[in-house]
Image (tube, helix red, strand yellow):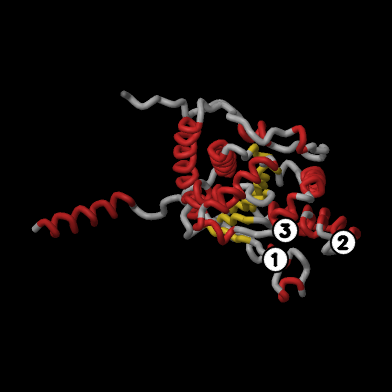
Amino acid sequence: MQPPTWDLDLKFDFMDEHRAHPHKKISLKNIPTETEGPFEGKEHARAFTARAVADIQALQYRTFVEGKQSLLVVLQALDAGGKDGLIRKVLGRMNPQGCRTFPFKVPTSEELAHDFLWRIHAATPAAGKVSIFNRSHYEDVLIARVNDLVAKSVWKDRYKQINDFEDLLVQRGTKIVKIYLHISPGEQLERFKKRLDNPAKHWKLNAGDYATRERWGDYREAYEDVFEKCNSKHTPWYLIPADKKWYRDASVAAIIRKTFEEMDPQLPAVDVDVEEIRKLYERESAEQKD
């Protein structure tokens, strides 16, 4: 039996479909956590993802060699939202010579002695590079807010500080893509079960995850404020239905590919005589054969 021939040149606009409109109040209750989009099932989506990842690799190479622009990918999700899987299957396929992932954990004592953006700024990408934030500066208006780690007057001021910070990065040539992986409480619980059933994933177990589930509504409200207050044409949020992992991977791959295409990185102009180099090669090749 011949394998199916999938349409991998879809006209579906993943960016438009999943972008949170700037300065508009978002209700996560009204955004689905599960969809199949334009795909005819998971195998179609996986074939699409493989093609998109190959394109991303080529575009990242051009970005690295060009050395003028950079890309920052911000990943946010509730526990078990799928950030690690997305990095492993899609974003982590980029050449590590020009791409680095930063998993932001609980701040150290040194980091707490500085402003909340100090450790973040140090991880932003240099020209030609890509940085992936696995959690980010947004934790300081999410977990810090929900768990009352700082006063309300403090976290409320951080929205403007974040916007100013991201605007600075954009002005310096960094493209910013912010991804929220939107899962349902039921899917989260199923993923918790899989962690329990798989000893290789026991290192991820955390009793605190269940306490966080009790604050689901509080986190949803905090995220909705982030999408309203820290979202612009140049620093967009994309809200990805992530219950189906294969759709998560395909849609994010499509968005990152399109972002690179919009950046349109160019290989540097050749400043050597290619024909002269070819003659040198042919001479050496002939001598090698002799």
Query: In whole angstroms, how far apart are the C-alphas of marks 1 and 2?
Result: 18 Å
From what the image shows, is residue 66 above or below residue 46?
below
Give the mark count.
3
The kind of residue on which mark 1 rests is Val
Does residue 273 sit above or below 18 in this rendering?
A: below
The part of the image, by quadrant, that contains residue 258 is top right
Q: Residue 226 in the image: x percent, y percent?
A: 79, 48
Residue drawn 23% across the image and 55% down it: 281
Secondary structure category for the residue under label 3: helix
Q: In the rendered image, is residue 209 in sight?
A: yes
Q: Which residue is mark 1?
A: 106
Front-most of residues 278 and 53: 53
Instruction: Indicate the position of residue 150 as horizontal and vertical percent values.
Output: 85, 64
The Cα atoms of the two marked residues, 3 and 1, are separated by 11 Å
Q: Who's the residue at 66% across and 31% down the image?
A: 17
Q: Residue furthest left?
A: 290
Label 2 CA crowd tier, 10 Å (few <14, some 14–19, many 20+): some
Disc 3: which residue: 137
| Residue 140 place in picture, x, y as percent | 77, 59
The answer to which of marks 1 and 2 sits earlier in the sequence is 1
* Comes first in the chain, label 2 or label 3: 3
Q: Which residue shows up at 60% across the image and 50% down it?
A: 83
Q: Residue at x 87, y 55 (%)?
A: 156
In the rendering, which numbered label is found on residue 68? none
Viewer-nearest of discs 3 and 1: 1
Identify the mark nearer the N-term, 3 or 1: 1
| Residue 164 visible (yes or no) | no
- Residue 154 - label: 2
